[in-house]
Amino acid sequence: MSSSTKIFLLIFTLIHLSTGAFSQSEKSRKYLDIKEVQLNDSVLVEAISALIDTTFVSVGEAPFDANISPFEQGKGYVELKVWNNQPGDILTKYQVTPTLNTVEADHSDSVYPQFFAYIKDRIILIYCMTCLNETQIGNTLSEESKVAFRERLEPFLVPTVKIKSPGKDGLLFDEDFRVQYYFIKPAFEILVHRSGEYVINFEPH
């Protein structure tokens, strides 16, 4: 069995074990957990490892400096999007992006990953794009799981700062603020052909 087939089966099996039977009724709603998994596709792991080595810098306990790239201060994580069973010759497509996006308590479930993993002590958020509709039907992520996930993600985010914001009565109050960073394009994508061939594209559309 090829490595690409193994990773497909792993994600497919975990998704179905997590979701179980689906129903639109509130009574039968399933509460899902964001699960930690291990990425076993050696080509994917090596590519992400190389990205981590060239993007993120390990630092000590020096205070965060807003004038220096957060990546150069060890902040940031990797977002991995997975499309399985693509049409034609493509079995699986991976898109890999280094990012600093924040996941907040009031964000919808779709912002949270279904899975996460670690490579070189860097958290990898895994979104199974071909499973999104299935996991959203009659299901929701458990609040406990989302809280635990945000705690795991926090060390990789830019720290918050206190700013003065006007309240309804006109008085100023302290509010936690975090600079948001957005990345338009992934760093690269990997196409896994049904023949077992891998193609890495560093200029994905």
Image (cartoon, helix red, strand yellow):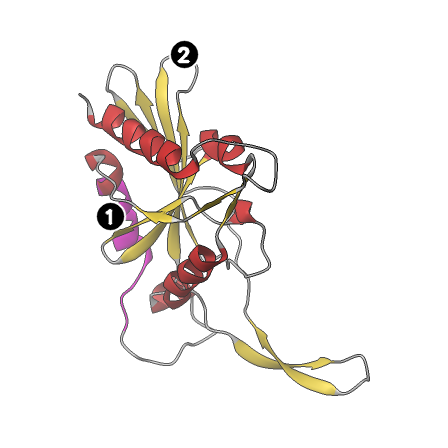
Circle 1 Cα neighbour tier, 10 Å, few/some/many (<14 / 14–19 / ≥20): some
Instruction: Quickly name the residue at label 1.
Output: 49
Q: Residue at x 24, y 41 (%)?
A: 45
Magenta region, residue range: 46-59
Q: Secondary structure at mark 1?
A: helix
**Residue 161 in the image, given as x and y percentages of width and height:** 53, 78
**Which residue is situated farthest in the bottom direction here?**
171
Q: Tell me the distance, in whole angstroms, between the alpha carbons under discs 1 and 2.
A: 29 Å
- Hey, what amino acid is under mark 2? Gly
Instruction: Quickly name the residue at label 2.
Output: 88
Nearest to N terminus: mark 1 or mark 2: 1
Q: Secondary structure at mark 2?
A: loop
Q: Which mark is residue 110?
A: none
Query: Does the magenta segment cover residue 139?
Result: no
Q: For this view, does 38 lie left or right of residue 74?
A: left
**Which residue is situated farthest in the right direction here?**
169
Query: Does the magenta segment cover residue 51?
Result: yes
- Hey, what amino acid is under mark 1? Ser
User: Which quarter of the figure has residue 105?
Assistant: bottom right
